Every structure is written in C-alpha cells, then in structure tokens.
C-alpha cells in the first residue's frame, strides 16, 4: 500500500481483509494444483518399473502436460476476464481434479501421454488467471509480497506433498491397486471439492464484496482504477500490444529460463535423491527440506522487494545463487552436501518469482493484462516440457544427473543476466 496510507484507513483495512479471505484459499488451491502436476515425479518411483517406462519416455510424458497447458493459456485467461474469476477458476479446479484422478487409469506410453496432455488442458489458465485476479484486488506496491505468498504454495506443496506422496506409495497392493494409483486418486479429489467451494469464497471484484464496508469497497476500487489508468498511459492495455511488444516477449523469455529450473528439478528431484538408496518415504521427507526453506525465502524476499521498490536485482541475485548451487550439486558427492546444494538452488529460483511477477502486472492492464500475463506464463511453461525432457535425455545418455544439473545451472545463470536488462521496467508505481 502507499507508505503514507493510514494503517487503519479504509484502503488498508480492505487490503488486509482481502488478504485474509482470498490468499489462504488460493494458496490451498495452488498447493493441489502444483501437486497434481508434479506428483508424477513420486509416482515414477514405482510406476516407471510397473509400466516399463524409460527415462526418456517418462521425461516426455512429464513434459507433454505443457503442450495442452500452453495451447489453452491465453484463451482461458480471456474467458476468465469475460465470465468472471469466480466461475472460471471453479471450472478449472473441478476439471483438473477429475483428470488428475483419471491418471490412475494409465496402462502404457500412449495413455500416459494422453492423460498428461488432458491434465495440461484442464489446468490451463489457473496460475495466470490467479495472477490476473490478484491485480483486481491488490495495488502495485503490495504485489511482490502478495504474489510471493501465493506462489509459496508451490514449495509448500512439496513440503507436505513429498512425505504424503511417499506414504501413499506405501499403500501398494491395497484393494488390488498400485501405490501410484492411490496417489493419483487421493490427491486428485480435493481440487474437485475446492472448485465447488470457490463459488462461495471468491468474489470477482472489490465493488461486489459484501464482506467489505462501503468505504473499503470505494477506497480499494478507486485505488485499483487509478493504477490501471496510470498503467494504461505507460504500458499496454490492448490484445495486440500485449502479444507482440518486445518487453512482454522478453519477460516471457526470462520466465522460460526460470521455469526451466523449477520443473527441471521439480520432476526429477525425487529420483536424484533416490540414487542414494533411500525408501520412497525417506525420499519424500528429504524432498520436503529444500522447499521448506524456499517457501520462507520467497515471502521474506518478496516483502523486501516491495519495501525497497527494486525488482531487477531481486530477480537476478537469487537466480545466480541457484545457478551456482546447481553447478555445485552436480559434483557434491555424498547425500549431505547434495541436499545443501539442492536446497540453495531451490531457494534461489523460488525467491525470484515474487519480484518477477510484479513486472508484467505493472506493465499490463485490462485485456492486455489477461492476454499478456497468460502469454508470459505460456512462454515460461514451454520450459516445463523442454526442461523435463532434456533432463531425462541427459540422464539416459550419461547414466547420471550431473550433466542435467549443469544444464539447469546454465539456464538460471542466463536468466539472471537477462533480468538485469529490465531497467526500464523498474517498478513504475502510479
């Protein structure tokens, strides 16, 4: 909020109420969103052997999710702007939950690829839709912190999801089903229930929020409208601009490099840790450690970025840290130094996400925001396919993860350098 804003004034209290009402629900939803996307990494500990998948087959299946996801990102975000966040986000959650459960029906390569593709189509638009939705509720000076709180759901998904996923695999044979089948079904049902609940919890715009006072609704609506008007004067508000301007495309390229690290390690970390001869449950608990530190770092770093108003170095520094840590992990040897390196790497690339997403939300507004935010996210998520697949190919070709970890290090180092080129986007607060 504005630094001179009364902490007890209507704008401040409206922001607090919106934070308490919306963010916890959206965080829980995003925990299951990410978990249902990457739990295939834990399922692979048994599924690959049961179904005869090679590392290349698994890597392609893990990544093909993003082909459907990317294709439907922009149309989904435009539909959200047209039909309202409440209805559209609920639709997305119910759809992906049902498809996530159906992953238990996979029987071979073809069905694996098909179900992952359908899961991507079902989930398309959720993350960029929420980022767009948050611009309806929170002023620019709050967004790195708020977005960091939301995206912290991703590491928290693994903090809790890792041990739970490992435990679900121990259900192998119960009622004649494999452990990985139980994992998909049990983790796919909650989003369906949350989708129904979203219809009650979410409100499209502050002006419609009965849980705000009239003064709070007016103050927040006026603040958001004033910022949107100022952004329109210096940024992009129409569809054509959002999809073609170099600054938007450059943000997409930067996000591509960041997501390379996110999913490159997200899909493969359980298997990296398993190389030390651990049980699935032990792998689950150890996988949680890097993400716990990452969740804390995201919130602290996002808050620091908001207070300082600085964005570029708040993106570049953690990406450089992550790059160095991935390079170290390639040669770290024993389990303890490997875990330290993986923790620093995960902490680094996650810390950059809050400051990063404050840039496109400060540059785009209106229909331009709906399309541009989805475009940036789509470009980034191309790396969900290429990163996961390249890691699989390198693992299969070399027999170890060292080359793959060096590939991730190079991508994040390049991302850090690209982030420093965004001086012209430095927090243009109205």
Image: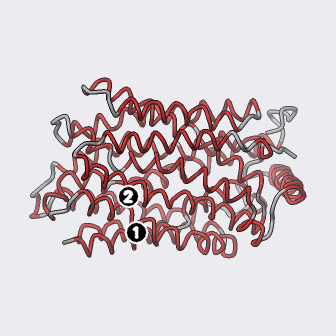
Circles 2, 1 touching at the beta carbon (< 8 Å): yes
> How many labels, in total?
2
With 291 as the anchor, is 351 left or right in this view? right
Q: Quadrant of the N terminus?
A: top right
Give me the residue at 35% from left, 66% from top.
100
* Mark 1 element type: helix
Give me the residue at 75% from left, 69% from top.
367
Q: Which residue is mark 1?
A: 119
Image x and y of residue 200, in percent: 57, 63
Image x and y of residue 40, in percent: 30, 57
Give me the residue at 69% from left, 75% from top.
82
Q: Which residue is mark 2?
A: 36
**Residue count near mark 2 (Cα–Cα under 10 Å), binned few <14, some 14–19, many ≥20:** many
Pick the front one: 173 or 318? 318
Looking at the image, tell me whether mark 2 or mark 1 is earlier in sequence order.
Answer: 2
* Mark 2 element type: helix
With 306 as the anchor, is 217 left or right in this view? right
Toward which corner of the image does residue 408 lie, by quadrant?
top left
With 365 as the anchor, is 184 left or right in this view? left
Pick the front one: 241 or 400? 400
Pick the front one: 382 or 290? 382
With 345 as the anchor, is 429 left or right in this view? right
Give me the residue at 61% from left, 70% from top.
74
Toward which corner of the image does residue 160 lie, by quadrant?
top left
Cα separation, mark 2 vs mark 1, equals 9 Å
* Location of residue 340 with respect to 72 vertically, above or below: above
């Amino acid at each position: 909020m504005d630094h001179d804003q009364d902490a007890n004034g209507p704008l401040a209290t409206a922001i607090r109420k919106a934070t308490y009402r919306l963010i916890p629900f959206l965080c829980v939803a995003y925990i299951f969103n990410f978990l249902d996307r990457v739990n295939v990494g834990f399922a692979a500990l048994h599924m690959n052997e049961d179904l005869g998948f090679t590392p290349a087959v698994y890597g392609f299946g893990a990544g093909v999710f993003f082909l459907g996801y990317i294709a439907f990102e922009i149309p989904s975000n435009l539909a959200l702007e047209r039909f309202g966040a409440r209805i559209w986000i609920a639709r997305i959650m119910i759809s992906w939950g049902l498809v996530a459960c159906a992953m238990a029906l996979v029987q071979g390569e073809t069905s694996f690829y098909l179900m992952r593709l359908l899961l991507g189509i079902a989930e398309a638009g959720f993350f960029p839709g929420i980022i767009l939705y948050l611009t309806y509720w929170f002023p620019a000076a709050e967004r790195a912190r708020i977005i960091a709180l939301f995206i912290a759901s991703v590491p928290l998904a693994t903090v809790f999801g890792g041990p739970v996923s490992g435990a679900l695999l121990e259900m192998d044979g119960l009622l004649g089903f494999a452990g990985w089948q139980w994992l998909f079904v049990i983790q796919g049902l909650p989003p369906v229930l949350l989708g129904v609940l979203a219809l009650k919890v979410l409100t499209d715009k502050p002006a419609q929020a009965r849980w705000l006072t009239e003064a709070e609704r007016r103050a927040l609506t006026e603040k958001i409208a004033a910022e949107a008007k100022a952004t329109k004067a210096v940024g992009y508000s129409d569809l054509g601009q959002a999809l073609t301007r170099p600054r938007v495309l450059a943000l997409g390229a930067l996000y591509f490099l960041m997501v390379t690290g996110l999913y490159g390690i997200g899909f493969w970390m359980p298997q990296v840790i398993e190389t030390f001869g651990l049980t699935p449950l032990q792998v689950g608990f150890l996988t949680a450690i890097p993400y716990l530190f990452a969740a804390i770092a995201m919130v602290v770093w996002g808050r620091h970025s908001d207070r300082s108003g600085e964005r570029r170095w708040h993106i570049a520094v953690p990406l450089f840290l992550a790059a160095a840590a991935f390079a170290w992990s390639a040669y770290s040897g024993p389990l303890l130094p490997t875990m330290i390196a993986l923790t620093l790497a995960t902490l680094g690339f996650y810390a950059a996400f809050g400051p990063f997403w404050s840039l496109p939300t400060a540059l785009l507004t209106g229909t331009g925001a709906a399309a541009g935010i989805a475009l940036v996210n789509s470009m980034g998520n191309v790396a969900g396919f290429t990163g996961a697949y390249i890691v699989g190919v390198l693992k299969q070709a070399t027999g170890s993860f060292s080359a793959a970890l060096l590939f991730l290090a190079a991508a994040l180092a390049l991302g850090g350098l690209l982030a420093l080129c965004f001086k012209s986007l430095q927090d243009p607060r109205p």
